[in-house]
């Protein structure tokens, strides 16, 4: 069973003391929707693909999907009794976590999705699912006690915007309660898209361990993959950073026609990790996160488009690409990378550059074919350079040319584009450091 902690440098995670790249899949609604035999099929497939964490909401996302099973008993008024847990629901959830941990997955549990918290926009539309203030502490204590043996990582919030004092107080209460009950647990706040602002008292709380963000599902804000980590790195309190909700494969273009594909997922991965969110990455497939069954209701079609049946979404090719991306990240020890777009001469910020602090390794992600110029003399400084076609996974040995600046002294290196019309990853390693 995994035992995940924060590294002393506050940049990455460790699993039993060793660097751990968090690669999660998104299965928010699985506790209430999946059958155990379906869950077993899913777990085996994702294990084969190299995933090591699973993001699950303890409570169903009732504002978007239909809950087959309920976490609380229903009172005489027809509303959930948040002081009376449905033991059968949590028995099944615990069994599902046991099955996941047997396959070496890290459970990542959302305590309170924003639809349950008064004062949020979604809760205002569904007030019948409001958790009372007096139920926050006993519910959180129950969750921690129920799942403690599986060493979960906790997202206290789900999709929060911290809209007002009431919302902040709810999540602060849950965070404090959880850390009092499980002081060694790793915690974070899952926030809505385009969001990096966290109330000061939560940012400065010793109870918060990670910064996670959502680059989200709008086509016009996909640059948040690398722009939001910049905001978190500027905060006074350093913490590891993870993009915990990029665009989902198969998801609609956020109120527009079109759906994200494997390329978009690869781009989100490399934009994020080279942009500073190097502690991990989360994948999502539209139909898996909600455990959708063809023909069942879905309440967010205008924004997200109709989900695919979970069996179809499970087989999307982008999940394999992300497993391969994790392999490249670990194989080349990219835990040491920091953003270095100052090295990029080519005038497109969509090309992302990162390097180790001593520049013994430099990594460049190029989403669209173009010559790339870096303000490094890769040849003279002894770099071995390779270019990986991320679509076909072919490796190219590019012919590097050296260019002099107008001062006649400074040099830069030009790496020619490939003929493949695909996204590529350029990895340059000083030969003295190769093994």
Image: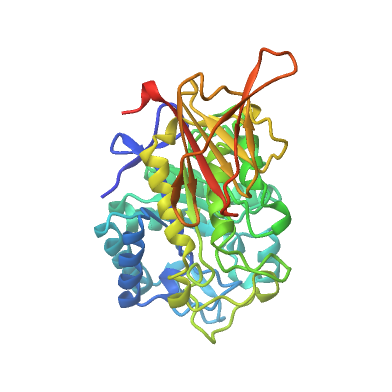
Residue 405, position as x, y percentages in the image? 71, 19
Left/right placement of residue 43 relative to residue 397 reads: left
Work out whether residue 411 or residue 252 is closer to the camera in this orientation and state it: 411
Location of residue 263 by image quarter = bottom right
Q: Residue at x 39, y 72 (%)?
A: 86
Work out whether residue 68 or residue 132 is closer to the camera in this orientation and state it: 68
Q: Residue at x 48, y 72 (%)?
A: 313
Residue 93, position as x, y percentages in the image? 35, 67
- Relative height, residue 317 to residue 150 (above, below): below
Residue 372, position as x, y percentages in the image? 63, 37
Location of residue 345 by image quarter = top right
Work out whether residue 117 or residue 212 is closer to the camera in this orientation and state it: 212
Left/right placement of residue 14 relative to residue 425 reads: left
The reply to whether residue 328 is visible in this rendering is yes
Residue 139, position as x, y percentages in the image? 45, 59
The reply to whether residue 241 is visible in this rendering is no
């Amino acid at each position: 069973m995994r035992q995940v902690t924060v590294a002393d440098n506050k940049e990455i995670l460790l699993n039993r003391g060793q660097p751990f790249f968090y690669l999660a899949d998104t299965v928010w609604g699985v506790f209430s929707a999946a059958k155990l035999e379906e869950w077993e099929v899913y777990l085996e497939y994702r294990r084969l693909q190299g995933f090591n964490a699973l993001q699950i909401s303890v409570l169903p996302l009732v504002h978007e999907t239909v809950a087959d099973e309920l976490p609380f008993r229903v009172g005489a008024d027809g509303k959930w009794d948040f002081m009376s847990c449905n033991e059968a629901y949590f028995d099944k959830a615990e069994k599902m976590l046991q099955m996941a941990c047997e396959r070496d997955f890290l459970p990542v549990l959302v305590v309170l999705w924003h639809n349950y918290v008064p004062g949020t926009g979604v809760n205002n539309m569904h007030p019948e699912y409001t958790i009372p203030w007096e139920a926050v502490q006993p519910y959180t204590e129950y969750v921690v006690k129920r799942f403690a043996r599986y060493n979960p990582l906790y997202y206290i919030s789900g999709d929060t915007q911290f809209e007002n004092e009431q919302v902040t107080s709810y999540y602060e209460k849950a965070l404090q309660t959880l850390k009092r009950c499980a002081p060694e647990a790793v915690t974070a706040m899952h926030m809505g898209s385009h969001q990096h602002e966290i109330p000061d008292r939560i940012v400065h709380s010793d109870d918060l361990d990670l910064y996670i963000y959502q680059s989200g599902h709008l086509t016009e804000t996909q640059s948040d993959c690398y722009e939001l980590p910049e905001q978190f790195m500027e905060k006074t309190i350093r913490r590891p950073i993870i993009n915990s909700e990029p665009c989902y494969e198969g998801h609609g273009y956020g109120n527009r026609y079109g759906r994200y594909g494997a390329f978009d997922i690869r781009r989100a991965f490399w934009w994020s990790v080279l942009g500073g969110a190097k502690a991990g990455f989360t994948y999502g497939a539209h139909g898996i996160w909600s455990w959708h069954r063809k023909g069942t209701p879905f309440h967010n079609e205008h924004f997200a488009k109709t989900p695919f049946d979970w069996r179809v979404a499970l087989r999307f090719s982008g999940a394999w690409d992300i497993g391969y991306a994790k392999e490249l990240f670990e194989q080349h020890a990219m835990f040491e990378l920091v953003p270095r777009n100052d090295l990029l001469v080519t005038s497109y910020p969509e090309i992302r550059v990162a390097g180790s602090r001593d520049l013994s390794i430099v990594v460049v992600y190029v989403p669209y074919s173009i010559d790339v110029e870096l303000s490094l003399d890769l040849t003279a400084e002894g770099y071995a350079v390779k270019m990986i076609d991320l679509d076909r996974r072919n490796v190219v040995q590019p012919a590097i040319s050296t260019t002099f600046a107008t001062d006649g002294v400074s040099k830069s290196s030009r790496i020619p584009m490939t003929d493949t019309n695909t996204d590529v990853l350029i990895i340059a390693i000083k030969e003295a450091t190769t093994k």
